[in-house]
């Protein structure tokens, strides 16, 4: 091999090594899909109005501590839309302990202010209790703020309250969450703002799966019928104990399927099982106790119990008395 060929080969090897080193460096540090604990404060650039914060000292200074919320670092998932894109871009590739201040333009934050989204509507579309300037209202599926009311008309601003505002986002990555169960808890806190009793376990589940037909035994002229067999498979399962707050949560009722799908995708689980426990506490007496076990109960007691149970007492009593007369005959 000539000296020139050897030099070219060496140069190519160096280029490959540099390329691999660059690719490795690009993937180092925090990446999309990582769960990070973030301490942050977001303010409007122009007025310095607080948009959100996790810091108790900032909340106290701004008078936000009266809301009953705990101000502490939040666990968020990178690359899943929980953060402004400019903030995510700044964090990805970084490390725990990194801090920075990122300015987000209005159009990338809450959107530019749109005059067309300030509209005049009939006052009849606004509940009577909300017919005053500043009231937050829901009209035809849109959230808005009442600006003025004149006669039978109202001027309503359907822009986001922070539309047109540039945002300053001051953050610190204080930790990374690797535990799968803690990741699950943080997801439900992000989606629903509530803590739930949950656990992860591996279940043995029986499933049917298709069996490939034996080509030697099958008739070439006939389409083989599909056959199945029952096999045992392992399912990584997130169990959640439903409580009344979860059962009545509007977002959960409307987006249960989407939330569980995203949880399984992000955590690499096979399924989510929601368990609802009804122990009967606080439900009062059962039917036997309510009606005195029937034996020895007076007619007035029975009527009173049936009225409490929202049952037509007169109709039931007529049926009981008729049955008794038939038996005596």
Image: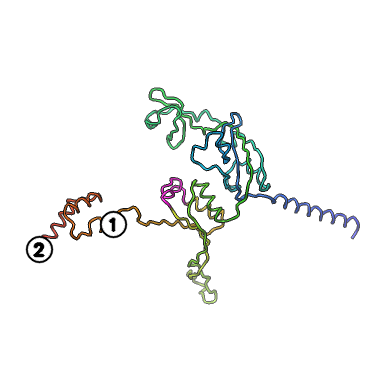
- Residue 120: mark: none
Camera sees residue 135: yes
Q: Residue furthest right?
A: 3
Q: Looking at the figure, which quarter contains the C terminus?
A: bottom left
Q: Are marks 2 and 1 in contact (CB under 8 Å)?
A: no
x, y percent for residue 264: 53, 55
The tag on residue 328 is 2
The secondary structure making up most of the magenta span is helix
Q: Indicate the quadrant containing the N terminus: top left, top right, bottom left or bottom right.
A: bottom right
Going 25% across and 55% down the picture, which residue do you hit? 290
Sequence-wise first label, 2 or 1: 1
Please provide percent x and percent y for residue 123.
39, 28
Which label sits on residue 286? 1
Identified at 38% across, 22% down, the residue is 151
Q: How is the image coloured?
A: rainbow
Residues drawn in magenta: 243-256
Indicate the secondary structure of the residue bearing disc 1: loop
Residue located 56% across and 44% down the image: 72
């Amino acid at each position: 091999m000539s000296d020139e060929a050897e030099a070219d080969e060496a140069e190519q090897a160096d280029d490959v090594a540099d390329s691999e080193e660059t690719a490795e460096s690009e993937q180092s540090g925090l990446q999309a899909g990582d769960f990070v604990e973030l301490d942050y404060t977001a303010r409007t650039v122009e007025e310095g109005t607080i948009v959100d914060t996790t810091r108790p000292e900032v909340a106290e200074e701004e008078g936000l501590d009266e809301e009953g919320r705990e101000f502490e670092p939040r666990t968020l998932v990178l690359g899943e839309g929980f953060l402004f894109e400019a903030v995510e871009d700044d964090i990805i590739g970084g490390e725990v302990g990194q801090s920075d201040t990122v300015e987000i333009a209005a159009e990338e934050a809450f959107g530019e202010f749109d005059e067309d989204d300030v509209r005049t509507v009939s006052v009849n579309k606004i509940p009577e209790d909300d017919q005053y300037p500043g009231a937050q209202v829901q009209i035809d599926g849109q959230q808005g703020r009442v600006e003025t009311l004149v006669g039978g008309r109202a001027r309503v601003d359907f822009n986001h309250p922070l539309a047109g505002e540039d945002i300053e986002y001051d953050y610190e990555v204080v930790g990374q969450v690797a535990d799968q169960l803690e990741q699950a808890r943080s997801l439900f806190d992000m989606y629903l703002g509530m803590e739930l009793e949950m656990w992860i376990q591996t279940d043995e589940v029986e499933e049917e799966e298709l069996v490939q037909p034996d080509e030697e035994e099958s008739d070439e002229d006939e389409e083989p019928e599909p056959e199945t067999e029952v096999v045992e498979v392992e399912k990584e399962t997130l169990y959640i104990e439903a409580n009344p707050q979860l059962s009545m949560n509007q977002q959960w009722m409307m987006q249960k399927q989407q939330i569980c799908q995203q949880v399984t995708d992000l955590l690499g689980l096979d399924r989510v099982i929601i368990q609802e426990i009804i122990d009967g506490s606080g439900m009062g007496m059962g039917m036997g106790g309510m009606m005195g076990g029937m034996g020895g109960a007076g007619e007035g007691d029975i009527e009173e119990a049936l009225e409490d149970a929202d049952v037509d007492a007169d109709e039931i009593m007529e049926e009981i008395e008729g049955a008794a007369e038939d038996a005596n005959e």
